[in-house]
Image (cartoon, rainbow, N blue to C red):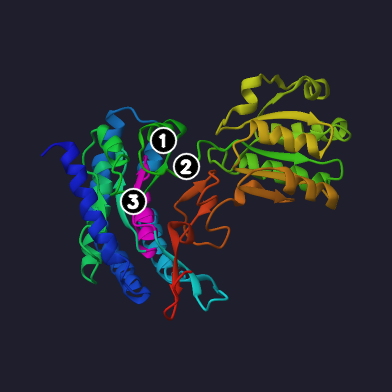
């Protein structure tokens, strides 16, 4: 059977599984998730053995220490996967929730109800724990899932998927509700995201290159975020210690993640006093600063910032710094150069706060807080499938509700339209 035929068969099986999942009660789904968690625990040795094969292959292939770390399945990471399954089981089931209801003058009662999306394809890189995280979130929302992980984690992903399937089957998981694309053929991604009528949504998780490749090839809808070019704007009314704390946290706590800041804008009225303090604070954390001409006039040690720097997601201890005349200029700058991910204002002035939150067109907009909180868990949503910078269907951290759509149910008693 060709790769094309294999993927069509996988899609057909997922459609059948999705229809069966849609009929399961919340209690039934939770029992399935608990059985999956128990099976992951029981298969811990097998998971680590499979992971050891991937790690050895990665070392021979010359993967960096950072990538090898992301690939490794330690006992703590297996424990985290198990906990994640149980945490999702404890979350409120969105399926069947009545979003709204109203009565028409003709007596028709209209209800807007949350329902599963159907079949979701997840394409991801490196971290094998995504196999479990993605699968259980999709299942809790009654979606069948087709997983396509990176070739560097093939054996780890296969072992995790097999444990999930085996555990779930013990409690009535529909067959083929969780499927893993086992081939390392790159054409499999193209085939998967072109399964119109079989796959309802594709969610790529990984670097900008992967996401752009998926978008360019897809025939099905894709939810994405290309990069996190996140900003902090320090207003003239800002409390300086607060601003310094927020900038340091948002840049330095984990510089390699998408909700870390890459740019700082400072109101020109306070720049002469604020920028030297910020530069000294960040120098202690070994942050490289790149500044506009106006910023470098105040802190000459900054490297010159190019036009490309303002668009760049560094994912490293590098920060671009500029001056603006007011909050409106800051918002305009962010909307032009940012990626609509996470942006923050530090200000005591309520009118500046309102202007910023009104004018900045990003998925998450912060007032006097670090952008590092853009995360499903930090938002109290439980686990997340990813962070969307799209505007349609889902925006920001995507959790269970974002893995559903809705339908209208209309109750009548013989009405006909005249």
Query: Alpha carbon of mark 1 to alpha carbon of mark 2: how far?
Result: 8 Å
Query: Alpha carbon of mark 1 to alpha carbon of mark 3: how far?
Result: 21 Å
* Residue mark closest to the camera, 1 vs 3: 1
* Residue ID for mark 1: 215
Query: Alpha carbon of mark 3 to alpha carbon of mark 2: how far?
Result: 18 Å
Determine if residue 73 is in view.
Answer: no
* Residue mark closest to the camera, 3 vs 2: 2
Image coords of residue 318 (percent x, y): 62, 29
Q: Residue furthest bottom?
A: 413
Q: Is residue 109 above or below residue 229?
A: below
> For the magenta stretch, what is the residue range?
117-141
Q: Which labelled disc corresponds to residue 302? A: none
Depth order, front residue of 325/38? 325
Q: Quadrant of residue 307?
A: top right
The secondary element bearing badge 3 is classed as helix
Please tell me how crowded label 3 is: few (under 14), some (14-19), or many (20+) other residues with Cα within 10 Å.
Answer: many
The secondary element bearing badge 1 is classed as helix
**5 relative position to 367: left or right:** left
- Whichever of callouts 3 and 2 sits on the residue coming sooner in the sequence is 3
Depth order, front residue of 37/33? 33
* Residue ID for mark 2: 224
* Residue ID for mark 3: 131
Image coords of residue 21 (percent x, y): 30, 65
Please report the residue visible at 43 percent of the width from the left and 39 percent of the height from the top: 206
Can you say which quadrant of the picture contains the N terminus? top left
Please tell me how crowded label 2 is: few (under 14), some (14-19), or many (20+) other residues with Cα within 10 Å.
Answer: many
């Amino acid at each position: 059977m060709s790769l094309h035929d294999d993927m069509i068969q996988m899609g057909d099986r997922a459609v059948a599984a999705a229809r069966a999942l849609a009929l399961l009660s919340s209690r039934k789904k939770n029992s399935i998730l608990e059985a999956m968690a128990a099976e992951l625990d029981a298969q811990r040795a097998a998971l680590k053995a499979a992971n050891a094969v991937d790690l050895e292959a990665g070392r021979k292939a010359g993967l960096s220490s950072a990538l090898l770390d992301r690939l490794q399945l330690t006992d703590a990471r297996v424990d985290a996967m198990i906990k994640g399954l149980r945490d999702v089981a404890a979350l409120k089931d969105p399926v069947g929730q009545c979003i709204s209801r109203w009565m028409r003058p003709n007596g028709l009662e209209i209800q807007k109800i949350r329902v599963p999306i159907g079949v979701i394809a997840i394409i991801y890189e490196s971290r094998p724990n995504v196999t479990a995280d993605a699968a259980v979130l999709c299942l809790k929302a009654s979606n069948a899932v087709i997983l396509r992980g990176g070739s560097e984690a093939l054996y780890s992903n296969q072992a995790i998927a097999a444990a999930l399937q085996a555990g779930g089957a013990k409690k009535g998981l529909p067959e083929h509700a969780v499927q893993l694309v086992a081939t390392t053929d790159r054409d499999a991604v193209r085939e998967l995201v072109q399964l119109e009528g079989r796959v309802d949504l594709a969610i790529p998780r990984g670097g900008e290159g992967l996401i752009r490749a998926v978008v360019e090839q897809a025939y099905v809808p894709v939810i994405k975020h290309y990069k996190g070019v996140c900003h902090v704007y320090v207003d003239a009314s800002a409390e300086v210690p607060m601003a310094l704390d927020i900038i340091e946290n948002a840049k330095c706590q984990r510089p390699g993640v998408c909700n870390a800041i890459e740019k700082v804008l400072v109101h020109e009225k306070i720049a002469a006093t604020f920028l030297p303090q910020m530069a000294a604070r960040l120098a202690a954390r070994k942050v490289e600063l790149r500044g506009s001409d106006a910023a470098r006039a105040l802190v000459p040690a900054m490297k010159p910032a190019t036009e490309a720097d303002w668009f760049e997601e560094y994912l490293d201890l590098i920060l671009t710094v500029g001056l603006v005349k007011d909050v409106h200029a800051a918002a305009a700058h962010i909307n032009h150069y940012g990626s609509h991910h996470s942006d923050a204002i530090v200000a005591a002035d309520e009118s500046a706060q309102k202007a910023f939150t009104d004018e900045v067109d990003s998925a998450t907009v912060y007032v006097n807080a670090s952008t590092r909180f853009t995360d499903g868990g930090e938002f109290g949503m439980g686990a997340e499938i990813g962070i969307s910078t799209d505007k349609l269907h889902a925006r920001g951290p995507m959790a269970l509700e974002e893995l559903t759509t809705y339908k209208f149910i209309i109750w009548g008693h013989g009405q006909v339209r005249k």
